[in-house]
Image (cartoon, rainbow, N blue to C red):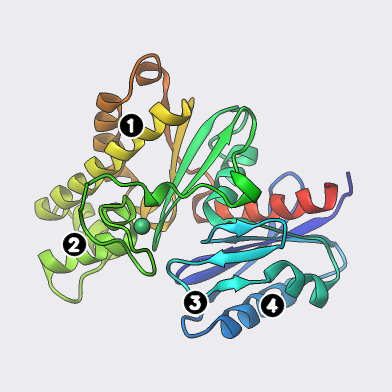
Amino acid sequence: MQAGHAIGLDLGGTKILTGVVARDGSVVRRHERLTPQDSQEHVLAELEAAVAELLDESVVAIGFGVPSPIDQARGVVVHCVNLPLEDAPLRDYMRERFDVPVGLDNDANAAAIGEWRTGAGRGEEDLVMLTLGTGVGGGVIAGGKPLRGHNGAGVELGHVVIVHDGRPCQGACTGRGHLEAYVSGKAATARAREMFGSSADAHRLVRLANEGDEQARELLTDIARHLGSAIGSFVNVFGPQLVVLGGGFGVAAFDYLAGPAEEVARREALEPMRSTVRFAKAELGTAAGLIGAAYVGFEAVDA
Ligand SMILES: [Zn+2]
């Protein structure tokens, strides 16, 4: 195992979070940039600039968490729901420019890996992590390793149906009634606007709840109960010891989401998981994704 640092990048719908990360998961330096929304070329250029500003001789690998299924054999970002990236050869692009091993993973997988290696899930063998941000991502650690599915595509827990024929999903997803359409930060913003007018968003919704606004708290409870339905199913499917909630919206609204979500999830889950599963807030906060992405980079070195 080589010493040194990895640069981890968490490509989000609004921000690119980047950090230089040590083997023990500590973040040595970090930066953030806004995510371009206009073209694939621009997104790739911005990711390249984000690496370049942190690169030094201590860096032995680069890892990316991207909100898309990944084709691991080709090192390709297959298709982002919320960003203009499609069939993007990210691994070769970055290898050619920086000449170090490059690892790719789904962003929610990366967040789950971060929490598992060094956050709320340390020492667990089986955990499910949900990241509530612009979209909803899911990462699963099963039997002590990340569950990546065929060719490493990752699992898309945000795109499971919780309401048959329900709300249209977000971005490029053509599905209906998906979890993401009910509990993402973007969905919370849409609901907040219906209730509080066009200037409201998910941040303001949480702020209003913090100030004691009953309508805001009820709306967050409703979002939480939808979340709980899905978590109950995930507990039945994956049998985790621990469910971790993270992502920008998930962390900010955790105090309003966790209780009602847990109550509904335990109603839906079967024994013995109903009694044994535990719930936790992501300990690494919004850094989970970039830390996990750095571990994906280290995996590329160690492979
Ligand atoms: Zn969907």
Residue 85 sits in quarter = bottom right
The residue singled out by tag 2 in the image is 191
The residue singled out by tag 3 in the image is 84
Task: Give the residue displayed 59% in from the left and 51% down from the top.
Answer: 110
Sort mark 1 into few (<14), some (14-19) or many (20+) by Cα contacts within 10 Å. Answer: many
> In terms of sequence position, does the residue under pointer 1 or pointer 2 come before the other?
2
The residue singled out by tag 4 in the image is 48
The residue singled out by tag 1 in the image is 232
Q: Does the residue tagged 4 have its C-beta within 8 Å of any atom of ligand 1?
A: no
Q: Nearer the viewer, residue 286 or 159?
A: 159
Disc 3 versus disc 4: nearer the observer = 3
Element class at badge 2: helix
Residue 287 in sight? no
**Kind of residue indicated by mark 2:** Arg
Q: Is residue 121 left or right of residue 194?
A: right
**Kind of residue indicated by mark 4:** Glu
Task: Give the residue displayed 39% in from the left and 27% down from the top.
Answer: 236
Sort mark 4 into few (<14), some (14-19) or many (20+) by Cα contacts within 10 Å. Answer: some
The answer to whether marks 1 and 4 mark residues whose Cβ atoms lie closer than 8 Å is: no
Where residue 131 appears, x then y in whole percent?
44, 50
Where residue 176 appears, x then y in whole percent?
27, 56
Sort mark 2 into few (<14), some (14-19) or many (20+) by Cα contacts within 10 Å. Answer: many
The answer to whether marks 1 and 3 mark residues whose Cβ atoms lie closer than 8 Å is: no
**Kind of residue indicated by mark 1:** Gly
How far separated are the C-alphas under marks 3 and 4?
Answer: 16 Å
How far separated are the C-alphas under marks 1 and 3?
Answer: 32 Å
